[in-house]
Amino acid sequence: MISQRLAVRRIPPLLRPLRPPNASKKPARPRLFTQNSQLLLISPAHPRPQLPYLHQTSRRLPHTPRLLLGRQSQLARLLTTESKRYIKDQFLLAGKWTLYGWTALFLLGIIALGVQNEILERQYPSPHDWSFWSRMNFRNARAQENPDFTGRGVVDWASTGNAYRILLRRLENPAIDGKGLETQREGGILIPDVGAAGYDIEGKSYQWRRGYFEVLMGCARAAEHLDGWVRDKTRNIAFPADVVIGPSNPNPRPTPPHAASAPQEADCDSAFEAPQTFYLKILTSKGFTTRQRLDAALAYADFLDFKNLHDSAEEVYKWGLDIASSAIPDYESIVDTRTGTIKEDAPTVSPNILHAATSLAIHHARTGAVSSALPIFLSALRARRAGPTSSASFYPDAQPDNDHSLTGPYRKLASTLLSYVQPPAYPSPGPSGDEPLTRPTMDPDCTEAALMTYIGEILFATSASPEAGLGWTHDAVDVAEARLQSRHVLVDEGEKERCSQCLDAGFANWTVMLRKLAREERERDGSKSRGWSWWGGGKVKEENVGRWEQELERVDERRERVRREVLREVFAANSGRAPGSVWMG
């Protein structure tokens, strides 16, 4: 038993733990070309067989002609099955995101266009019964007249006029926005160099008629600015007439830098229609209000004055006075249409008659006919002062707020938010100008100050006593300054701008008058009112300073003080603070 035990030997312990055999020692099995099995990174590498008729070298054999190689000169196969699928997936992914990007960009552009049109609609309301494209063209045309719209500080009148002209064609086209537009059956006339008279638009709505009037006036403004310009038919670009190269312009003016080259005279025609084409269309159309026709007549007459056609301008000014008078039943007891003077015993006067008469007087003053202008100015000032005071309240800021409930602020906030969602309402017709004239307050306004400025200038130039003209000018400056500094009355920015212009004109006239009187006083006395200092080099006063010289210094000091106050209010309005919180030094 013991021998048998000794015969049994123990198995020696393993030096290493058990593990599967090494797979790298196994022979690699080649992958078949007829099957596409996935090649995993954790799997052993199985080389793909390189068959001679499938494997192409990347280089040609040395010293072998190209023609002898034939098909063996092809490059090695670059796309495998896996890389081909990867590239295809990447192309699909790039196309998908590109489509998403362009779609988002297109939608954002539509949103931006809609927001811009909503903003322009609130600034320049368009008639609601026009088509979508006509309304958008109208807003863009009105916005292009603003020099700050394009960011260049100038107005491209060629582009603006073309936008107005396209819109006018849409409005006069019966197939688009001119449905129901009729020609005048009775009273239709032919205007030389213009064509037929205007249309009969009495059957159109108020919004359509007002928009049509604004388009015609926009075309007229563009025609005035493009008067004398030509259009290059080959490039459709407008140029001033003095840069055209041709026989009629032997010395053309060079074009500005970075501008298009000058056109040839044979390739040019008129850049725009004549202004009278649009003004006379308004004056001869049926359906416009008296104020609209009067505005067109006065604008046309002002353009004729600019062209130095003063006789024609006077006839158009009188035409405007006839238009304003024709709306009043008994106009012969109010104004003398032959001279333009408003009668002293006139029972009442309309704003249109007063506006037309004042414009005629300004025309007489500009052309030197002061004997005809002075009676009109005096009668217009007398008629304004004799007008009754309006019963409407002109102090909206002083009205008490009776809404002390908690819902007041919330209602105001809701109405503000709702105004951004709802389309803005079209402006109401407003006063026609044919109603009797009423004054907003008992105090003189800026219109009266302007009339007093004209009267003072004429009296100073024609009267034997210059103090009469100085007195009228002094009163005009006082009225304009008081009106400009009255914050409760001046609620309209347009009226404030007119008062600023009237005040500047009054100060300018006053300064010119005093300088002339001071010069005459020095020449009469034979002595100068100022000398030179040997030490400081500046001017010093002498003892014999004249009366008008001292008055001129006081006017200059007052003018500088008013300018500082106006600038202080402008800075306060821009910064949102009270005028007293801005320190001007």
Image (cartoon, rainbow, N blue to C red):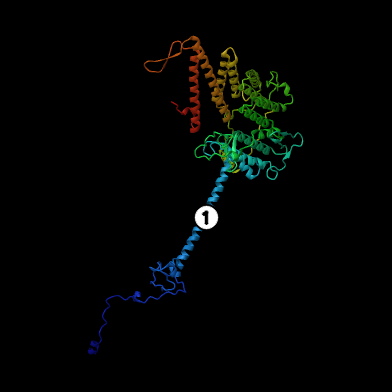
Q: Position of residue 498 (x, y in %)?
A: 57, 27
Look at the picture and state if 67 lies above or below 250: below
Res. 243 image quadrant? top right
Q: Residue at x 46, y 68 (%)?
A: 81
Q: Which of the two residues, 67 or 431, is positioned nearer the viewer here?
A: 67
Look at the picture and state if 194 lies above or below 312: below
Q: Position of residue 218 (x, y in %)?
A: 62, 36
Helix or strand or loop: what does disc 1 sit on? helix
Q: Position of residue 418 (x, y in %)?
A: 59, 42
Res. 423 in view: no
Q: Quadrant of the N terminus?
A: bottom left
Res. 117 image quadrant? top right
Residue furthest top in the image: 525
The residue to which callout 1 is attached is 100
Q: Which of the two residues, 500 or 411, is positioned nearer the viewer here?
A: 500
Q: Position of residue 182 (x, y in %)?
A: 73, 39
Q: Residue at x 70, y 36 (%)?
A: 195
Q: Residue at x 69, y 45 (%)?
A: 175
Look at the picture and state if 416 lies above or below 535: below
Characterize the local packing of mark 1: few (<14), some (14-19) or many (20 or more) Cα atoms within 10 angstroms.
few
